[in-house]
Amino acid sequence: MPFKDLREFIDRLEKEGEVQRIKEEVDWNLEVGAMIRWANEKGLPAPLFEMVKDYPEGYRIFGSPLGTQKRMAIAMDMDTNSSVREMQDEYLKRKRNPIKPVLVKDGPCKENIHIGDKVDLLAFPVPMQHLSDGGRYIGTWHLTINKDPDSDWVNWGMFRNMLQNKNTVGIEAGPYTHFGMLHTQKYLAKNKPMEVAIAIGPEPMSTFCASTCFPYGVSEVDITGGMRGEPVELVKCETVDLEVPATSEIVIEGEVRPHDEMEEGPFAEYTGYMVTLKSPRPVIRVKAVTHRNDPILATTCMGMPVIDDNVLNMVSLAAELQEVLTAQGLPVVGVSMFKEICWALVVVAVKVPYANVASDIAHVLWGSRAGFCLSYIIVVEDDVDPFNMGEVMHALATKCHPYRGIVREEHARMTSYEPWADHHERKYRVGAKTYFDCTWPLEWDPADVPIKASFANTKMYPLEVQQKALAKWHKYGY
């Protein structure tokens, strides 16, 4: 059964050994961030901070909700031993069966309502996560909601939110994001304010889908319903014409006004580095805040892998990339993104149908919304398991020609977060990309193709020999 709210999800995680309650007082200033960072880097249970310095008892912080593969499986209501490939397959199956939300009159997020002068975002235990951050970030694991003024499409996304003061929140959302497109191409072009809602701590599939790269115009809330197997319950906001998940822990309502900006950043990001500089960025002027009794502030501490984004992208983004390729008729057998490498690199295994198929794979991915952020693509043949890093590295070192097999593309579109990029490249989001062709050239005589010395290769060990060898190993308990 799907989780009705974040609290039910936490209870299940605790039963599975994936939550650690921290009952002693912890300082919101760096200490919370440091403890989440340690949990991320060591694969530890998600910390639930129950006593935060300077804040009332009951006001809690929940760090790294989806920071391990096991927590991802639990969020999807799957077996905790599910493989990444199994989760990808299930993701694609559910995505193809969206379920529309239902509107309810009330919900737990309305237990406390503060409007106008009563708004005080500093009443929540917002952590200062990294020493060099530009401020305290209230939005790091949440969903951001805005609406297309020319249609009935409502967009869900996830964009960092820095506290400017008690009723103003900064937001970083580039013009290539759906939030940024709606802001600049629709509202700003008409010199109109854009209403925004931020929902912190809904049930886990809502944040999961808000973080996923769906095409423009696709409803993330409908996809969330498909992922859950039942509709999301939404409730109307108090001061803006938007709806939010009814069981959210904290809801922030406001608007982005034309040309209204304040300095935002820097912030340590998903790449594992702090690369974005302080810069004027849009702000949300907050009109209202609603929250549950004893609210839980869900957060993730960006930095070196593994973080929630990495685990999420291993499932959703990799599956989206596979769908992009198969839609073009490319015989892809698997797509993998390793949790240690963020968004930077993808491995594609393919049954090679023609010469230079690696070029087509790379350009199809780079031309897609889901894949434009990829700096590196490794293309391997179907005898390589793309989910096995050892096999991938072996193919890279032995099958990729050191000169002809490494193809670089200059003046390529990129994000502004790349650590390797210089200031000019980050500012204008123009850098470079590379793909590695780890497939044997089709023009080679088959006799010239090296035989892979592997147990599974029947050219090396015939099937009957494999079966005999395995049978004897099994007698020894293996």
Image (cartoon, grey):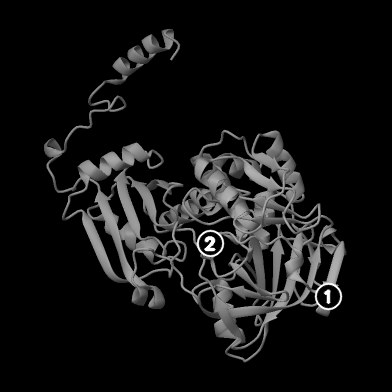
Residue hosting label 2: 131
Residue 278 placement (x, y as % from top left): 50, 75
Residue 204 placement (x, y as % from top left): 67, 51
Q: Secondary structure at mark 2?
A: loop
* Number of numbered tags placed on the structure image: 2
316, above or below 162, in the image: above
Locate the N terminus and report the quarter of the image it occupies: top right
Residue 32 placement (x, y as % from top left): 63, 53
| Of labels 2 and 1, the one closer to you | 2
Residue 457, located in which quarter of the rendered image?
Answer: top left
Q: Residues within 10 Å of mark 2 (few under 14, many from 20)?
A: few
Residue 190, located in which quarter of the rendered image?
Answer: bottom right
Residue hosting label 1: 118
Which one is in front, 60 or 139? 60
Residue 80, located in which quarter of the rendered image?
Answer: top right
Locate the C terminus and report the quarter of the image it occupies: top left
Amino acid type of the residue that numbered disc 1 sits on in the rendered structure: Lys
**Any part of residue 244 in sight:** no
Q: Secondary structure at mark 1?
A: helix
Which one is in front, 35 or 244? 35
The residue depicted at 31 percent of the width and 27 percent of the height is: 456
